[in-house]
Image (cartoon, helix red, strand yellow):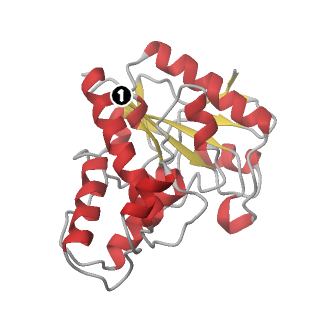
Amino acid sequence: MIEAPSPNHDARRAPPDAVILHYTGMPTGPAALERMQDPAAKVAAHYMVEEDGRVFRLVPEERRAWHAGRSFWRGETDLNAVSIGIEIVNPGHEWGYRPFPDHQVEAVIGLLDAIRGRWTVPDARILGHSDVAPDRKTDPGELFPWKRLAEAGHGLWWEPEPERIAALGAPLSLGDEGAGVFVLQAGLHRMGYQPRPSGQYDEETAMVVTAFQRHWRPERVDGVADGETRARLVGLLRLAEADLTGAG
C-alpha cells in the first residue's frame, strides 16, 4: 500500500456499506493521482489501483471521499456518504478504453477482501459508477471483469438458462410502451436505479438499461432490453434481495 494523501474529503454521517468502482478515465495513472491530490479539483477516491497492481491510499475509509458526485441507488442520493470509492487506472472510453490487466484485477480483489473484512458491505452494494450515475458516467465499463469479481466472492452475477430467455419474448426498445415496459422499469427501480416505472420506453429507460448492461450484460450494451438482459435482471433481483435481507 502506497500512501498518497488527498485533501478532498470530509466527515461521514454513517459507516460505509457500499463500494463504488470507477476507472480513472485519464491518459495516465500519475495524471489521475495528481488530480485527486489537487484541492482545486475537489475529487478523490479512497484508493487508486494502478495497472501493475500497485495500490495507493488517498483517503481514510472513515472519511467521506468525493468520488461519486451526484448519484442515486436504492433511495440514497449521497453515495459518497455511505461508500468507499476505488479508482482503477484505465484511460476509459475517451482516451483508449482497454481491458484491465490481471495484476490490476487481482489487486482490486485483494483490496475488496480487506475492505469487507472491516465493514459490512453486501454483494448487492458493490457497484459501478455508471450504476449510480447512469446519466453522467460509463465507468468502469463493459470491459471490467464483473463476473471474475463475483467468482472471487465480491458482487452479484447471474447467467440465465436459455429457456428463461426464450420465455420473455421480443426485445423491448425505445418507443415501446405497455405492461412489459412497466415491468422492466419496475425491476430496474427495485434493483436500485432511480427512474420509476411509467410504461413508456423513453430515452431515460434506454440509458438505465445501458448502464445495467455495462455491469451485468456486457456482451450487449445498446439500451435494448432483449430477453437475456431481462432474464438477468430477474435473476439478479432475487440474488440482491436475498443478499440484502441476509445482510440486514
Residue most extreme to the top: 117
Against 81, residue 111 (above or below) is above
Looking at the figure, which quarter contains the N terminus? top right
Q: Quadrant of residue 52?
A: top right
- Residue that lies at the very extreme toward the right in this rendered image: 52
* Tally of numbered discs: 1
Q: SS for tag 1?
A: loop
Q: Which quarter shows the C terminus?
A: top left
Q: Nearer the viewer, residue 187 or 71?
A: 187
Image location of residue 33, percent across then percent down = 67, 43
Callout 1 environment at 10 Å: few (<14), some (14 to 19), or many (20+)?
some
Q: Amino acid at mark 1?
A: Asp
Instruction: Decide if residue 84 is on the left or right side of residue 205.
Output: right
User: Residue visible at 45% across and 68% down?
Assistant: 226
Q: Residue furthest front?
A: 163
Residue 242 appears left or right of 166: left
Q: Give the residue displayed 68% in from the left and 36% down from the top.
A: 49
Q: Quick one: 163 or 235, which is closer to the camera?
A: 163
The residue where tag 1 is placed is: 17
Q: Is residue 93 above or below residue 164?
A: below
Nearer to the camera, 143 or 243: 243
**In the depicted view, which residue is nearer to us: 239 or 206?**
239
Residue 136 appears in the rendering: no
Which image quarter: residue 109? Answer: top right
Where residue 209 appears, as percent x and y from the top left, is 41, 65
Determine the image quadrant of residue 108. Answer: top right
The location of residue 87, given as percent across then percent down, is: 60, 42
